[in-house]
Amino acid sequence: MSLLSQKLGTAVPIQWQYTLAKNGQSKLGVYSGKSFLESRLNESDLRPGLLKWIARHNSTLGRSADFWQHTSGANVPGISGNVDENISYTDTITGGSGKVSKPAESKPAKEKPVAKKSSSGSLLKRGSRGSAVLALQKRFSSVYFYPDKGANNHGCDGIYGSKTEDAVRRFQLTHGLTADGIYGPQTAKALDKAVATQKKSKPKKSPTHKVVKGDTLWDLAIKNKTTVAELKKLNKLKSDIIYPGQILKLK
């Protein structure tokens, strides 16, 4: 896509927005898929203050936006079939809190912006920094909600920026909370539960033994209630000979 083609493609929404603005419309925006917006339009030529509503059905938006349509597979009571679901990062349109308009049978609990301590620490939000943020990022990563999966340490850097806020929003959305990107008591409680569940689901490591002088496969088999044949199979041994310093799996 050439720069000229981008400019020509951008001219259409520019003219449309100009016409709307001229007729008294102040809340203007553009709805587009992420790849189309970035490859077919020249964003720097768009009207200043234009709201961007991006459709990207993925676990990560990967750019700034005012609204993110993250799935087309949501369910709304009373509507048959799937519907689109969006996250709002601004209250410009609604005049409200900018929260996710996720349908639910019961109203989700809201995070209260107070410095009340939860089981996992104090309230944290965008702009927070330090060891508490780093610990929080690592806990979210342990349940696969990475601040930035492709970055060094998955983006765990102790800075509560836009990507950490996005990870918190995605977690909140998945667990039926108000997706405001703020880590408070309700989110802490859900994260505690998710981390505990993840730990329980991890398979136990196979016990091992470091061979010392005098050890034999026979003795190790007797002590660990197994057989020499099983130990050889488990450790891919071709003979009964073992050596000091060798690490053997026992089960």
Image: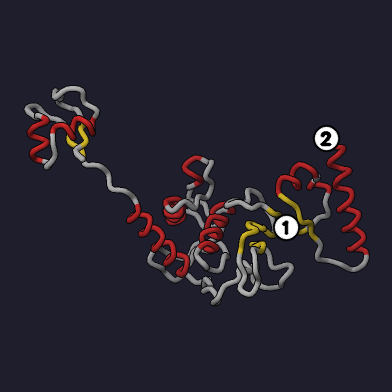
Mark 1 to mark 2: distance in Å? 24 Å
Residue 51, percent across and down?
A: 76, 59
Kindly identify the residue that appears in the image at 52 percent across and 68 percent down.
177
Could you tell me which secondary element the residue under label 2 belongs to? loop
Residue 14, percent across and down?
A: 87, 53
Amino acid on which disc 1 is placed: Trp
Q: Residues within 10 Å of mark 2 (few under 14, many from 20)?
A: few
Total marks drawn?
2
Q: Quadrant of residue 190?
A: bottom left
- The residue tagged 1 is 53
Residue 210, percent across and down?
A: 17, 33
Q: Earlier in the sequence, mark 1 or mark 2?
A: 2
Q: Residues within 10 Å of mark 1 (few under 14, many from 20)?
A: many
Q: Nearer the viewer, residue 134 or 75?
A: 75
Quarter of the C terminus within the rendering: top left
- The residue tagged 2 is 2
